[in-house]
Amino acid sequence: MKTGIKPLKECNVLVTPTSFSKYNKNLANELESSVGKVIYNTTGKPLSEGDLIPLINDIDGFIAGLDNITSNVMKAARNLKIIARYGAGVDRVDLNAAKEYGIYVTNTPGTNSVSVAELTIGLAIAAARNIIEGSSDTKNGNWPRISGATLADKTFGIIGLGSIGKEVAKRLKTFNVKLVTYDVFFDESFLIQYDIRKTDLKELLTISDFISLHIPVTKETINIINKESLARMKKGSILINTARGELIDENALYESLASGHLKAAAIDTFKKEPPDKENKLLSLSQIITTPHMGAATDNASNDMTRISIEECLAVLKGEKPKYIVTGP
């Protein structure tokens, strides 16, 4: 730790998730009454290194959203003892730097799995049935005859069968789809229970009518969906990404959609968030875009708020947190 433990009432906490107190103001009030000062992110978007450095100097605890928490941020954080991620992913936190500077990094595993899975299936149906186009045309006074595709009897490929991927698979079984999956590790009992066939990535890309991404960002997974992998996908297939924008080569996805090779895509995450207005993907009618809202539900936000507060306060009181990703 950079400094010793001090009374909670003298501690300052930075909170950057914009939905932190939206669903449970009582928990936010509890945090505010426990510490000296709570500083909230009012920008409505994740904070960059440049945004964070001026804020972090006197912060003791950081409940973090999808901010870019670099080594330079931690170097500037002379009192920081914990980065409590409001969510599961820690790919935007420099974990090596956190360990070097004696800062705990925690997360809230499993709290948003159901919410992200539900959005995934909603996006798959919306893309397959052209729901956005139909709604827009109807509102504009038209009454179009729009043909779509069912999920039933289709092959649905899940890349990453972790907590979220499993929740997607459970729900898809009721749609009478053929489930295939690719992952580094497999839960064999789960595969048997839900009649899921494991395969390699190349075959999954080739045989799937729908493909959904549920893997973390690593050196191996950055741009896992690229020009080559998109070319392997079935003509007329649909891609869904509710994981991380870094998994997709956005230029290659644009070309695949614009050429008509992919029927559609539904994207909840971008490499840059929010995306630039000039991002070519935003110009396509074949793509559904949402503002990284997979975890933004009442249940998930309530659980993430509660756990991130508990983890933050535990460390500020000199206790060991429960969901440690890395630490001193």
Image: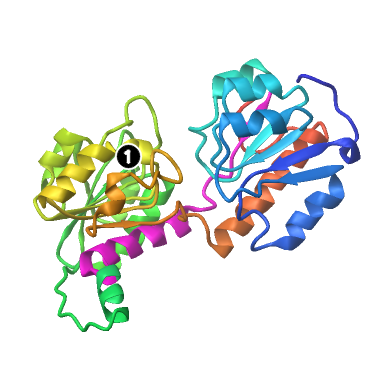
Q: Secondary structure at mark 1?
A: loop
Q: Quadrant of the C terminus?
A: top right
Q: Quadrant of the N terminus?
A: top right
Q: Which three-letter amino acid code belongs to the residue tagged 1?
A: Phe
Q: Is residue 134 magenta?
A: no
Q: Is residue 126 magenta?
A: yes
Identity of the residue drawn at 17% across and 43% down: 255
Pointer 1 residue: 186
Identity of the residue drawn at 63% across and 15% down: 100
Picture layout, residue 12 above or below residue 328: below
Image coords of residue 223 (percent x, y): 29, 33
Occupied quadrant, residue 14: top right
Q: Nearer the viewer, residue 1 or 21?
A: 21
Residue 198 visible in the shown view: no
Residue 261 horizontal side relative to residue 172, left or right = left
Image coords of residue 229 (percent x, y): 17, 37
Residue 135 horizontal side relative to residue 148, left or right = right
Residue 183 visible in the shown view: yes
The scheme the figure's colours follow is: rainbow
Q: How many marks?
A: 1
Q: Residue furthest top?
A: 100
Image coords of residue 110 (percent x, y): 51, 49
Q: Nearer the viewer, residue 174 or 79?
A: 79
Identity of the residue drawn at 56% across and 34% down: 48
Q: Residue furthest front?
A: 278
Chain part drawn in magenta: 103-131
Q: Nearer the viewer, residue 326 or 254?
A: 254
Q: Residues within 10 Å of mark 1 (few under 14, many from 20)?
A: some
Residue 160 horizontal side relative to residue 106, left or right = left
User: Majority secondary structure of the magenta segment?
Assistant: helix
Image coords of residue 150 (percent x, y): 18, 69
Identity of the residue drawn at 47% across and 55% down: 293
